[in-house]
Image (spheres, rainbow, N blue to C red):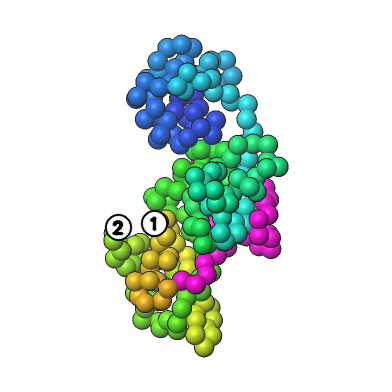
Amino acid sequence: MQQRIQKIIAMMGVTSRRKAEEYIQEGRVTINGKVAKIGMKADPERDHIKLDGKLLIKHQEKVYLILNKPKGVITALSDPEGRPTIKDFLRKIKYRVFPVGRLDYHSEGLLLLTNDGELAHAILHPSNKIPKTYQVKVKGIIDQAKINKLSKGIKLEDGLTHPSEIRKISETENNSWLEVVLYEGKKRQIRRMFEAVGHPVLKLKRVKIDGIYLGDLGKGELRYLTKEEIDRLKRSVGLAN
């Protein structure tokens, strides 16, 4: 069945549809030896589609997993400094998958992995406002006024944060535990938000993305998403069949 070439490239898990359009405009994509143009269609079962001269193969099953990323691991498939990466936990996965978004080196918890470039791009696009839920331990006893201030949005060096949902779960003599739900993904956003109001983050764990829960998955463990979880994600970003 013929489809637009940028959609085919995204379906193959190479990159997002928007990035595929850029590749086409740069003349890097060919169909049966001819340079592709935006709007052209092809049949991935019959036509030879190449990116930078490399044939793209459609027959790769789409896979969707979550990893409970431990603290002290880089969200990347390689690291020039030789630090542990998430690739260390993917050795038994026969498919080439990539992380959807990031968790910083000192953070842990739910990390989504897939070879579905179109879905990954849609999840990360700020217009879709996919909720991501974190458990956060901060230094000191944070008061409700500061929680309200952070929830409404706070100015950081790269702009104003979007409204978020923050509630205090518990507190000890010296620290506070909170649940934070974000709808965007600025770099190290939660850490910077709480630093801005004088409460540095001591521990950060992502426990949920949309309707996908980390649950009792052990540190460093993987599991495949259920069909229901995949379908929910696709509905949330407007990619449902």
Residue extending farthest to the front is 81
Labels 1 & 2 near each other (Cβ < 8 A)? yes
Residue at the (57%, 15%) spot, across then down:
46
Which residue is labeled 2 in the image?
158
Q: Position of residue 207 (x, y in %)?
A: 57, 63
**Three-letter code for the amino acid on which mark 2 is drawn:** Asp
Q: Position of residue 43 (x, y in %)?
A: 53, 19
**Cα gap from disc 1 to disc 2, whole angstroms:** 8 Å
Q: Start and end of the magenta stretch?
A: 201-224
Which residue is labeled 1 in the image?
186
In this view, 75 is above or below 9: below
In the rendered image, the quadrant that contains the C terminus is top right
Residue extending farthest to the top is 33
Helix, strand or loop for disc 1? loop
> In this rendering, would 24 be left or right of 156?
right
In this view, 174 is above or below 86: below
